[in-house]
Amino acid sequence: MSSVRDGMNAAGAAGATWLRSSSGPIGDSRVEVAFLAGGEVAMRNSRHPDGPVLIFTRPEWDAFVAGALDGEFGQPA
């Protein structure tokens, strides 16, 4: 999807089915992801569903998930 850029508005991912993370207490900020038709993965803040959306290629997403599972990003401060 050549017209997709990081920071695009959620309207640019219209028709996407968003999945919310299950971590953290109910009501806390969570991320939502959507697997787009072109193979990309979109991510947004659940508190701002009409706000910016980050778009990852599938290899980028796979590397992000692998890094998170491996503890690559450390613990929050």
Image (spheres, helix red, strand yellow):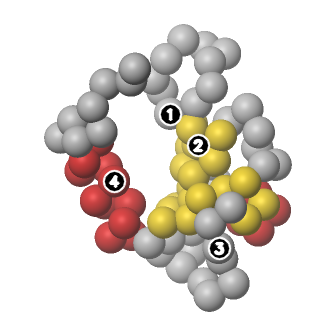
- Label 3: few (<14), some or many (≥20) within 10 Å? few
**At label 2, which amino acid type do we have?**
Glu
The residue carrying mark 3 is 5
Residue furthest toward the top? Answer: 25
Asked whether the residues under the numbered discs 2 and 1 touch, taking CB atoms below 8 Å apart as contact, a structural biologist would say yes
**Residue plotted at (50% across, 71% down):** 40
**At label 1, which amino acid type do we have?**
Ser
Label 3 secondary element: loop
- Label 2: few (<14), some or many (≥20) within 10 Å? some
Mark pair 3, 1: CA separation: 23 Å
Q: Position of residue 73 (x, y in %)?
A: 30, 39
The residue carrying mark 1 is 21
**At label 3, which amino acid type do we have?**
Arg
Asked whether the residues under the numbered discs 4 and 1 touch, taking CB atoms below 8 Å apart as contact, a structural biologist would say no
**Residue plotted at (63% across, 47% down):** 44
Residue furthest toward the bottom? Answer: 2
Q: Quadrant of residue 31?
A: top right
The mark found on residue 64 in the picture is: 4
Q: Is residue 62 above or below residue 72?
A: below
Label 4 secondary element: helix
N-terminal label among 3 and 1: 3
N-terminal label among 2 and 1: 1
Q: Is residue 45 above or below residue 16?
A: above
